[in-house]
Image (cartoon, grey):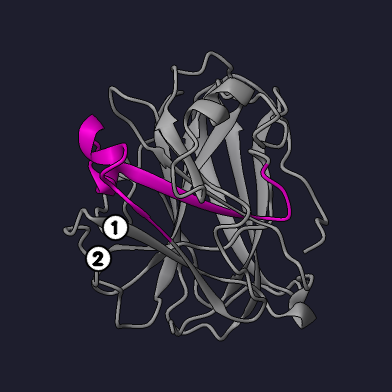
Amino acid sequence: MKARCRAGFVFLLAVASSPATPVSGQDHSWFEKNKQRDMHRYEGLLDQPNAKREYDVLGFFAQFAEMPALTNRTQLHVKYFLPPQSAGSSENEQVFIQAKQFAGRTNYLMKAGPEATQNVAGQWNEFYWRTRDVIDGAGIPPGQLGIMVRLGSDNEYTEDLAPAVFYSGNSMPQSNITGYALTLRVRLNSLTSLSCQLESDSGTALKNATKCFYTASHSCQRLQPESKIIEAGSLVTVCMDMENAGPGPVLLHIEGQYKNSSDKLVANYRFYHQRQIQ
């Protein structure tokens, strides 16, 4: 999918992640050290990053009326839908899958290798990995993992995303997708407001209004009262109600006002809404 706009006010531009490219505490030696034996992923623990970005996007999940329980810790699964080629995807769409903690004493990171998935346009694709290699030993709850599926490039501010259906074992959701949750952490400055808007690919606003709220939780299932101030370092979850929306490309625009500043946090994302899971 070809990018048409970029997230605004980026104070520190992240570079694309690859086994040869240092970024956010990762370097070539980290990838070499943490290449798992199945050769399909790089997985391990990182030092806490010192870089201060404007915000970090930590997870983009599909939502269901009943969210799947991550009870089976043997394998973790990520399903994602790649847009049909007519919706802007290329025949050989590059997909970058990442799992990272929302919070915790450790700083876990998993990146799928390029040979790990088939990545077929217009279909649901799947990636899974076992927990015994790192997660079990480090005592990391799977429910504390944010999953990002980026399309086209592995940049922290990549705008083309695929929502992740995240589940364990044989607990794949059987119901349709009702919406999405995008979680980011505000880094540099506090926000006094946050708003968001969904548009179709034609630029018209979708009928179902999006709910935007600040919560210490990363789940849309745990509603909390909105806070007047979103403190730097806090999680922000943008919840999208799309239960009655038809399939197709969607544009998400997020805008926040920084405290004691005329600057704004501006972010734009594109994804494909495919309600039915196969």
Which numbered dot is residue 169? 2
Q: Whole-percent x and y of residue 1?
A: 77, 64
Question: Which amino acid type is marked by label 2?
Answer: Gly
Q: Whole-percent x and y of residue 80?
A: 51, 68
Q: Which residue corresponds to the image point at 18% horizontal and 59% vertical from the top-left?
A: 72
Among all residues in the image, which is located at the extreme front? 37
Residues at discs 2 and 1 in contact (Cβ within 8 Å): yes
Q: Which residue corresponds to the image point at 58% horizontal and 17% vertical from the top-left?
A: 51
**Left or right of 2 in this view: 151:** left
Q: Which of the marked residues, 2 or 1, is nearer the chain's N terminus?
A: 1
**Helix, strand or loop under label 1:** strand
Q: Is residue 222 in view from this perspective?
A: yes
Q: Which residues are magenta?
A: 128-154
Looking at the rendered image, the quarter that the C terminus falls into is: bottom left
**Left or right of 208 in this view: 234:** left
Q: Which residue corresponds to the image point at 76% horizontal and 79% vertical from the top-left?
A: 85
Quarter location, residue 65: bottom left
Which numbered dot is residue 75? 1
